[in-house]
């Protein structure tokens, strides 16, 4: 029997970051109460949720207390120990499932599964110990990227290797296990967020085009400026993954559009995603509301976009100049996460600039539209 949460129902969110904060705000709008599980008591989600359990992610008694206080469990953070999710699953429904979380936690398992679904990825080989380093060149050639299989984010735990000399320079410092990926000569980076409900119906948001700076997402454009056929294939890929994994919840799929015009899946994340923040202001149902709806057992419905949007991340330091400029710029909405310290590289907030549907500016127009709030315009 599907689990359907009534208004007043309690949703437990593991992780206290900005994704939890914005999910909890969406939940509150729908009459649900969120209870956050976080190791620290000063996290962004704690400002906006009525209750919390503070404990380490592997603290069994804290996890049990958390479970007692909620009707259903979800997460905004992926690096939760599998045993902790297993414990929670024995106590309350958990969406998305432990199985999906475990796949997304390990780049080797993730790539194997995507390839088993018949989806293209970058060419890759597992590098489980130092002896395997020697075989990468024959399998992939140079250049390649070494990535830690677990716990990477925002480009952390990755090494670009262009030559045997590069490899020699880093080989004594590498952690294992690793995955080596051939460098995809990509034209664009895209992402799709799919929501799938307990009944097996799935809908996608429009495809997003993403630009990174120093390994951190900088700007997302929605819709991606690609052909309708390519957009449909990207959404089809996301739906295939969602159905294949029997997802209940939302899942982000990061894709490369390679130089030959083919789509290759980079990675998946079974949670709200930074590249979906534009949906807060340009869609009737945001990714955060879609997340909460799926977890609450509501039926999925089309994820309609009513405006074009550009999302600009505010990354520390220098955030507040952009934030105040955004507040003065008509057609833009500011979202700050309530973090005290704007450390370099830390995601502090984002800005959604909205345009009438069909009016998303090209590169020149983009600079004009975002001018005051682009990095270049900041001190
Ligand atoms: N195989 C690859 N080929 C080309 N670029 C890549 C490849 N893998 C990663 N990148 C670049 O590095 C960024 C971060 O890598 P990703 O695997 O998404 O890790 P993270 O978990 O840090 O987001 C990607 O968005 C992309 O720009
Ligand atoms: Mg990524």
Image: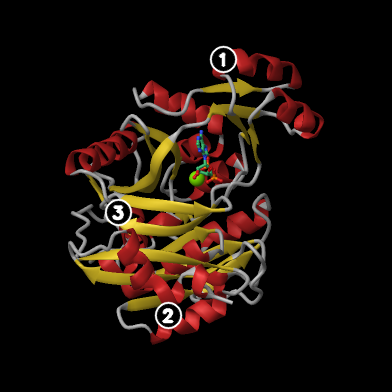
Residue 310 x, y percent position in the rendering: 34, 64
Mark 1 crowd level (few <14, some 14–19, many ≥20, 10 Å Cα): some
Alpha carbons under labels 1 and 3: distance apart = 45 Å
Give the residue at mark 2.
Answer: 326
Q: Is residue 233 above or below residue 9?
A: above
Alpha carbons under labels 3 and 2: distance apart = 36 Å
The answer to whether residue 377 is left or right of residue 171 is left
- Which of the two labelled residues, at mark 1 and mark 3, occupies the earlier sequence position? 1
Which mark is in front, 1 or 3?
1
Within the image, what quadrant is residue 260 found in? top left
Give the residue at mark 3.
Answer: 297
Label pair 3/2, CB-CB below 8 angstroms: no
Q: Is residue 329 above or below residue 37?
A: below
- Residue farthest along the right direction in this orientation: 172
- Which of the two labelled residues, at mark 3 and mark 2, occupies the earlier sequence position? 3
The answer to whether residue 113 is left or right of residue 346 is left
350 or 225: nearer the viewer: 225
Mark 2 crowd level (few <14, some 14–19, many ≥20, 10 Å Cα): many
Q: How is the image coloured?
A: secondary structure
Residue 105 x, y percent position in the rendering: 55, 39
Image quadrant occupied by the C terminus: bottom right
């Amino acid at each position: 029997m599907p689990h359907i949460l009534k208004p007043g129902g309690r949703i437990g969110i593991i992780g206290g970051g900005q994704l939890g904060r914005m999910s909890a705000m969406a939940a509150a709008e729908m009459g649900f109460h969120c209870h956050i599980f976080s190791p620290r008591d000063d996290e962004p989600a704690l400002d906006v949720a009525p209750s919390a359990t503070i404990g380490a992610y592997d603290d069994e008694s804290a996890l049990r207390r958390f479970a007692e206080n909620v009707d259903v469990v979800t997460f905004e953070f992926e690096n939760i120990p599998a045993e902790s999710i297993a414990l929670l699953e024995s106590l309350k429904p958990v969406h998305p499932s432990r199985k999906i979380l475990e796949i997304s936690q390990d780049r080797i398992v993730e790539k194997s599964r995507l390839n088993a679904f018949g989806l293209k990825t970058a060419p890759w080989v597992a590098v489980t110990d130092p002896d395997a380093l020697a075989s990468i060149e024959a399998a992939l050639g140079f250049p390649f990227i070494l990535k830690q299989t677990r716990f990477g984010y925002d480009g952390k735990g990755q090494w670009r290797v262009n030559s045997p000399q590069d490899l020699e320079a880093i080989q004594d410092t590498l952690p294992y296990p690793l995955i080596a990926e051939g460098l995809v000569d990509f034209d664009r980076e895209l992402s799709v967020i799919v929501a799938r409900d307990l009944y097996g119906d799935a809908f996608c948001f429009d495809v997003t085009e993403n630009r990174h700076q120093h390994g951190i997402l900088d700007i997302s454009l929605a819709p991606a400026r690609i052909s309708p056929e390519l957009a449909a294939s990207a959404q089809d890929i996301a739906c295939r993954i969602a159905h294949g994994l029997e997802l209940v919840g939302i899942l982000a799929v990061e894709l490369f559009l390679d130089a030959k015009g083919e789509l290759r899946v980079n990675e998946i994340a079974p949670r709200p995603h930074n590249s979906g923040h534009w949906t807060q202001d340009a869609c009737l149902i945001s990714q955060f509301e879609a997340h909460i709806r799926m977890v609450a057992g509501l039926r999925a419905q089309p994820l309609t976009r009513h405006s074009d949007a550009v999302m600009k991340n505010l990354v520390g330091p220098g955030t507040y100049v952009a934030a105040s400029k955004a507040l003065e710029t008509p057609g833009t909405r500011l979202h700050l996460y309530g973090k005290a310290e704007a450390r370099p590289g830390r995601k502090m907030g984002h800005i959604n600039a909205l345009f009438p549907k069909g009016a998303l500016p090209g590169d020149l127009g983009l600079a004009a539209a975002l001018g005051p709030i682009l990095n270049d315009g900041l001190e």
